[in-house]
Image: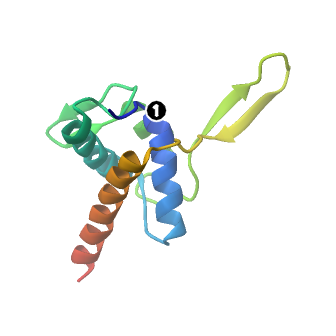
Amino acid sequence: MGNVYSAQNIASYLIYELNEGHVFVNNKSIQHILTSVERKWQQAFGHSAYQEQVYVDEKGHTVKEVYEAYEMYGVCHIPLPATEFYLKYGTFQLVERTYAIPNFTEIEISLVQQALTQYRYQLLSKAS
C-alpha cells in the first residue's frame, strides 16, 4: 500500500529532478506529471497519491494548491520549488523554506520516475 503525500512535496521532487537533468519544467508540465503520477498511483495502490483534492476537467487533472504556488511563472521555467512558511514549536522565528522532498518507498519512487521518464520522452518526441 502506498503512502499519501502532499502534492507540494511531490512537485518539489519533480522540480529538483528535472532541474538536475537540465529539463524544462513549468506549471503546466508539473500538472501534467502530477496527473501521470496520480494515474500510476491509482493503478498500483487503489488510492490517490495526494492529500489535496485533485480537480478533473476537460484539460486534465489539476491540484489547485500546486497550480497557485507556481502560477507566477506562467509558461517560464521553474528554477526552484515553492516555499512555505514554518514556525518551529517554541520559537518566535518564522522561517521560509522550500517544500521538502517526500521519503518515498522503492515502489513509489519507481512510479514517480516512470512519470518523469514519460515526460522527458514526450519532450524529446515533440522536439524531433
Location of residue 52 with respect to 15 vertically, above or below = above
Residue extending farthest to the top is: 90
Q: Residue furthest bottom?
A: 128
Q: Give the class, few, some or many, for how many residues have Cα within 10 Å of label 1's Cα (few <14, many ≥20).
A: some
Q: Position of residue 94 (x, y in %)?
A: 78, 27
50 on left or right of 12: left
Residue pictured at 22% horizontal, 42% vertical: 39
| Residue 4 left/right relative to 124 | right
Residue annotated with mark 1: 6
The image's colouring method is: rainbow
Residue type, mark 1 in image: Ser
The answer to whether any part of residue 73 appears in the image is: no
Q: Quadrant of the C terminus?
A: bottom left
Residue in the foreground of this view, choosing between 22 and 38: 38
Q: Which quadrant of the view contains residue 84?
A: top right
Residue 104: x, y in percent? 47, 44
> 60 or 117: which is nearer to us?
117
Instruction: Tell whether 103 sits left or right of 114.
Output: right
Residue at image location 32% in from the left, 65% down from the top: 117
Q: Is residue 49 left or right of residue 97?
A: left
